[in-house]
Image: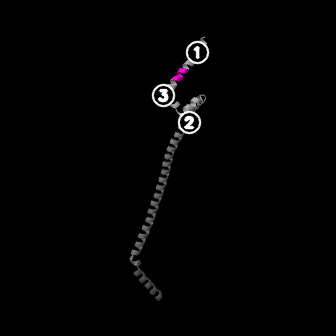
Amino acid sequence: MDGDRDPEQLRGNWALLMTQLRQDPRVSQLLSTRPGQYLLSHPALAPTLLLFAAFAVLPVALFLAFAVVTFIISATGFVFFQGLLLFVGGMSLLCTLVGVAFFSVVVSLIFNVFYFVLSSILSHPRLTKHKLQEEEGGRSKLLEDQ
């Protein structure tokens, strides 16, 4: 008899639990909606949907966590990659500007040397245009005399 009593007691406890569950305002609000009415009319579908929802939560949550972590890592990696590109670009610009500065200094020195050499050559009194003409005239006289 004790074995007969246990299933009856379980059935009573189950009925009491279901009654309390249906009296909950949130559950009654859900059951008053159109999908809730459909689930009440198809009782075999309700546990199937409940199990599907319970088992689908973990994979969906894992996928969303994976997507968020991937996005964060990608954004962080992009920032580091962008920083690396800016560093490489800055170093290239620095090397180019140093090369341009060195080239400018060398060309400026060459032009200054030419300027000072030419100005010192032209400033000698014996190499002025007047003196050159006299010397050429004197040479031509010397050549005629010979």
Give the camera-side residue of 13 and 33. Answer: 33
Does label 3 or label 1 sit earlier along the sequence?
1
Type of amino acid at the residue the image marks with label 3: Pro
Type of amino acid at the residue the image marks with label 2: Val
Taking the spot 55% from the left edge, 18% from the top edge, the residue there is 12
Label 1–label 2 contact, CB within 8 A: no
**Percent coordinates x, y for residue 121 in the rendering:** 42, 73
Q: Which mark is residue 6?
A: 1
**Percent coordinates x, y for residue 16 in the rendering:** 53, 20
- Crowdedness near tag 2: few (<14), some (14–19) or many (≥20) residues, C-alpha within 10 Å: few
Magenta range is 15-19
Taking the spot 53% from the left edge, 22% from the top edge, the residue there is 17
Give the camera-side residue of 112 and 123. Answer: 112
Q: Quadrant of residue 43?
A: top right
Is residue 90 magenta-colored? no
- Image quarter of the N terminus: top right
Determine whether the residue tagged by mark 2 lies in a helix, strand or loop: helix
Q: Is residue 50 visible?
A: no
Determine whether the residue tagged by mark 1 lies in a helix, strand or loop: helix
Does label 1 or label 2 sit earlier along the sequence?
1
Type of amino acid at the residue the image marks with label 1: Asp
Label 3: which residue? 25
**Percent coordinates x, y for residue 34 in the rendering:** 54, 34
Label 2: which residue? 60
Label 3–label 2 contact, CB within 8 A: no
Mark 3 to mark 2: distance in Å? 29 Å
